[in-house]
């Protein structure tokens, strides 16, 4: 496991734990998004023998793909040891019997993928809510670096927060997210108030770290980098699944 020495906000244990236990757990339509992601992989790929989950959090995307392809290898990568260790615990808990590798590195650094190359190339790379906080230039660079990690014909799918084309879309997304957070927290605390959840969400410290780009703009970047079959496969307000394939050798 490699460790980037440049600290980032996600390496703060309290931030990572709060994200895993609250914000991520309450993502609207989370199960539907995973179902669609698996369906896209099923119809979009011919071979899945090596999987990379970037920004794995608790490893939910990578583990879901692996359950569909139980003989594949899986690498779980995130910026925080808390995230990666939580993913490791989930793998052990689910008794996943395959080759699983764990990797910690800061994606804001251009060296984040060096150790990942040793376990590649990858037939499927999935990323979950891991790239939206980076600058647009860094996003483009990461997509190029992901392209290099893919096997020919390999598929990259990004489940990500994106910028809405309108202020109304931004507002609707925020209200929808607060509704989901409220419903999630109410299960364990029946006395919680929606206003309390809304205040925490709208005035959260990490809000200023979001640097969102529209899904349309990002798919244009993917095409410019050489990805084929690029599409926005799913989009509701500020949550989208988009991606494409690395060009096959015979294309």
Image (cartoon, rainbow, N blue to C red):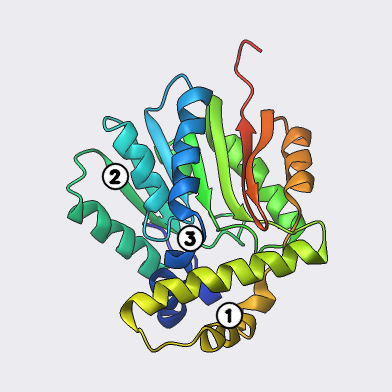
- Relative to the observer, which residue lies in front, 111 or 181? 181
Q: What is the secondary structure assignment of the residue under circle 1?
A: helix
Badge number at residue 105: 3
Which one is earlier in the sequence, the residue at label 1 or at label 2? 2
Sequence-wise first label, 1 or 3: 3
Label 3 environment density (alpha carbons within 10 Å; few <14, some 14–19, many ≥20): many
Distance from disc 1 to disc 3, alpha carbons, whole Å, reads: 27 Å
Given contact means CB atoms under 8 Å apart, are the residues at marks 1 and 3 in contact?
no
Please say if the residues under marks 2 and 3 sit with CB atoms less than 8 Å apart: no
Say which of marks 2 and 3 sits in front: 2
1 vs 2, front mark: 1
Residue 211 appearing in the image: no
Where's the C terminus, which quadrant?
top right
Element class at badge 3: loop
Q: Position of residue 236 (x, y in %)?
A: 64, 52
- Check whether the beta carbons of the residues at disc 1 and disc 2 lie within 8 A of each other: no
Q: Residue 179 is drawn in which quadrant?
A: bottom right
Q: Quadrant of residue 199?
A: bottom right
- Extreme right residue here? 166
Identity of the residue drawn at 36% across and 70% down: 82
**Residue bearing the label numbered 2:** 100
| Residue at 57% over, 68% down | 177
Q: Could you tell whether 6 is left or right of 76 in the image? A: right
The circle drawn on residue 201 is 1
Distance from disc 2 to disc 3, alpha carbons, whole Å, reads 17 Å
Q: Nearer the viewer, residue 21 or 234?
A: 234
State how far apart marks 1 and 2 are (Cα).
34 Å
Q: Is residue 155 above or below residue 25?
A: above
């Amino acid at each position: 496991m490699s460790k980037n020495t440049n600290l980032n906000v996600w390496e703060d244990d309290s931030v990572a734990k709060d994200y895993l236990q609250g914000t991520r757990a309450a993502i609207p339509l989370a199960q539907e998004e995973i179902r669609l992601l698996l369906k896209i992989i099923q119809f979009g790929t011919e071979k899945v023998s090596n999987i990379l989950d970037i920004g794995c959090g608790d490893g939910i995307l990578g583990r879901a793909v692996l359950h569909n392809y139980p003989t594949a290898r899986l690498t779980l990568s995130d910026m925080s040891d808390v995230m990666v260790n939580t993913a490791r615990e989930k793998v052990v808990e689910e008794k996943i019997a395959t080759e699983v590798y764990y990797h910690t590195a800061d994606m804001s650094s251009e060296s984040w993928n060096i150790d990942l190359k040793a376990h590649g190339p990858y037939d499927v790379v999935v990323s979950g809510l891991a790239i939206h906080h980076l600058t647009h230039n860094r996003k483009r660079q990461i997509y190029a670096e992901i392209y290099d990690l893919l096997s020919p014909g390999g598929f990259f799918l990004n489940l990500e927060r994106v910028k809405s084309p309108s202020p109304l879309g931004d507002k609707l997304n925020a209200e929808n997210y607060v509704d989901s957070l409220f419903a999630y927290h109410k299960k364990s605390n029946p006395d919680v108030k929606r206003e309390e959840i809304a205040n925490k969400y709208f005035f959260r410290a990490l809000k200023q770290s979001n640097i969102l780009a529209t899904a349309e703009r990002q798919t244009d970047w993917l095409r410019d980098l050489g990805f084929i079959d690029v599409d926005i496969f799913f989009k509701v307000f500020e949550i989208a699944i988009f991606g494409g394939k690395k060009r096959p050798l015979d294309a």
